[in-house]
């Protein structure tokens, strides 16, 4: 039994068109118009198959195989459909479309083979996580954080966009979070009851250069990097750009420039070269060419697979920022914005994926992930979790150039299905 590779690619190509920035990569933020269209497309496909469709308060979707039986343990399988701004066509949605293929294939087979009796197999639910990228509110894995109880009701007001509009407002506008909303039949409470979750599987593009460079078609993820994000606000004195002498300025922008280079130099000292730092978002006020910037605000994000290193480098960088600001006579405010722990994934599930790849004669590499994924949240909540990677051409992702060879996409989805079948036949034990 194999997935339909042509259908997988054709679904991905159709969904690629759902973007707010045609011709400039895919921009599909959660709770926006294109996100709603993508959800509708996937939900329509699932309903045609006879699947149950449930949503929760924050728009996570849970789509059940028609042959599921109440009370059985379940294998969860999926990813997200939102993107970064001007992102690629595969990040997240590849795992979702592959999970849809798994459902389509199993639905066709279970429908034929098990009409009537109880086959004893595990249930399979596809999950579409909302707001994974943090594009609206700056916090990654938001949907899965609600789903696992890491975020609660108060975070609906705490999480705001750049203009101060709260997540609660977004949900109201999108018609989500209420019984009878636009795209679901039933409303599940958050956090979800995960006591019956036997496994979580997420298939994803690697988003880095390891597999592509090595010419290896499959990655089996053993650990996911953690991260810590700080929001830094430097405040100097705004003044006229022409009339203020250079030695009388308190320029928040030049201070920010020095801070950013210092952050880069700090992690460059990591002997293992695994720590990464990114200043990915910056705003200047008033942002006029002829005014010395009074305020500059930026995010600073440190990632590693070791929590001690994340905290150590974050503290050293923050200390450096305060020193630079003091030397320049400007103020520096630093606050923790968000974080996630580095996480080992489940060894047992990794072993099932490994053996399945081996049986199929597919070369693989066991590797860690610098990108975070919703799977982290499920793993943290105690669900045995595994991830499969396929190569990213030239290691590019979160940009319009993000791509993967068709044959690699299809191979990954096949391996996902085979892994689900293995797990259904030999259910993993929860510790
Ligand atoms: C998600 O893509 C992340 O790693 O930030
Ligand atoms: Mn992703
Ligand atoms: Mn991403």
Image: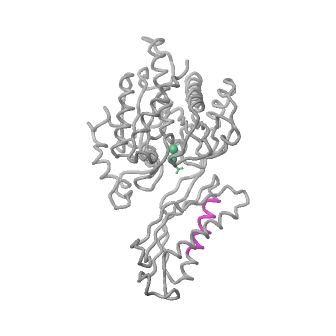
Residue 220 spot, x, y in % from top left: 64, 37
Check the image and report above or below for 359 versus 430: above
Residue 238: in magenta span: no
Q: Main secondary structure of the magenta part?
A: helix
> Residue 69, image x and y in percent?
43, 22
Q: Residue at x 28, y 38 (%)?
A: 181
Which quarter of the rendering shows the C terminus? top right
Reply above or below: 94 against 356.
Answer: below
Q: Nearer the viewer, residue 425 or 136?
A: 136
Q: Image height check: is 85 above or below 330?
A: above
Which quarter of the picture shows residue 287? bottom left
Judged from this view, the residue extending furthest toward the left is 180
Relative horizontal placement of residue 121, taking residue 69 as reference (left or right): right
Front-most of residues 96 and 351: 96
Q: Quadrant of the N terminus?
A: top right
**Which residue is at 46% across, 17% downward?**
108
Q: Residue furthest right?
A: 271
Q: Is 320 contained in the magenta span? A: yes
Look at the image and give the residue range highlighted in magenta.
Answer: 308-321
Where 304 falls versus 355 (above or below)? below
* Residue 188 falls in image quadrant: top left
- The answer to whether residue 63 of the structure is visible from this angle is yes
Report if residue 431 is visible in the image: no
Whole-percent x and y of residue 430? 57, 34
């Amino acid at each position: 039994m194999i997935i339909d590779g042509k259908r997988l690619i054709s679904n991905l190509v159709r969904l690629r068109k759902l973007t707010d920035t045609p011709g400039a990569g895919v921009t599909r933020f959660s709770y926006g118009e294109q996100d709603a269209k993508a959800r509708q497309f996937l939900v329509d496909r699932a309903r045609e198959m006879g699947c149950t469709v449930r949503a929760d308060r924050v728009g996570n979707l849970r789509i059940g195989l028609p042959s599921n039986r109440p009370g059985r343990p379940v294998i969860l399988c999926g990813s997200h459909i939102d993107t970064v701004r001007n992102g690629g066509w595969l990040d997240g949605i590849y795992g979702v479309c592959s999970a849809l293929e798994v459902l389509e294939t199993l639905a066709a087979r279970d429908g034929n083979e098990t009409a009537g009796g109880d086959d004893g197999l595990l249930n399979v639910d596809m999950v579409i996580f909302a707001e994974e990228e943090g594009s609206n509110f700056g916090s990654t894995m938001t949907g899965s954080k609600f789903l696992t109880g890491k975020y609660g009701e108060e975070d609906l007001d705490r999480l705001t966009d750049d203009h101060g509009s709260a997540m609660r407002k977004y949900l109201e506008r999108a018609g989500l979070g209420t019984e009878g909303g636009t795209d679901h039949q039933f409303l599940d409470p958050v956090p979800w009851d995960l006591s019956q979750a036997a496994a979580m599987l997420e298939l994803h593009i690697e988003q880095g250069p390891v597999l592509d460079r090595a010419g290896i078609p499959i990655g089996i993820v053993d650990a996911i990097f953690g991260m810590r994000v700080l929001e830094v606000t430097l405040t100097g004195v705004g003044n006229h750009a022409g009339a203020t002498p250079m030695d009388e300025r308190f320029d928040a922008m030049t201070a920010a420039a020095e801070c950013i280079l210092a952050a880069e130099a700090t992690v460059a000292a990591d002997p293992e070269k695994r720590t990464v730092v990114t200043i990915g978002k910056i705003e200047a006020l008033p942002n006029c060419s002829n005014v010395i910037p009074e305020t500059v605000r930026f995010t600073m994000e440190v990632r590693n697979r070791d929590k001690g290193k994340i905290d150590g480098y974050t503290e050293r960088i923050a200390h450096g920022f305060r020193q630079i600001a003091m030397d320049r006579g400007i103020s520096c405010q630093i606050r923790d914005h968000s974080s996630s722990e580095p996480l080992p994934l489940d060894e047992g599930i990794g072993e099932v994926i490994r053996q399945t790849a081996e049986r199929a004669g597919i070369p693989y590499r066991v590797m860690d992930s610098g990108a975070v994924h919703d799977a982290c949240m499920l793993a943290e909540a105690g669900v045995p979790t595994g991830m499969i990677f396929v190569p990213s051409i030239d290691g590019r992702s979160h940009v319009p150039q993000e791509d993967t060879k068709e044959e690699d996409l299809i191979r990954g989805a096949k391996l996902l299905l085979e892994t689900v079948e293995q797990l259904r036949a030999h259910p993993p034990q929860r510790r």
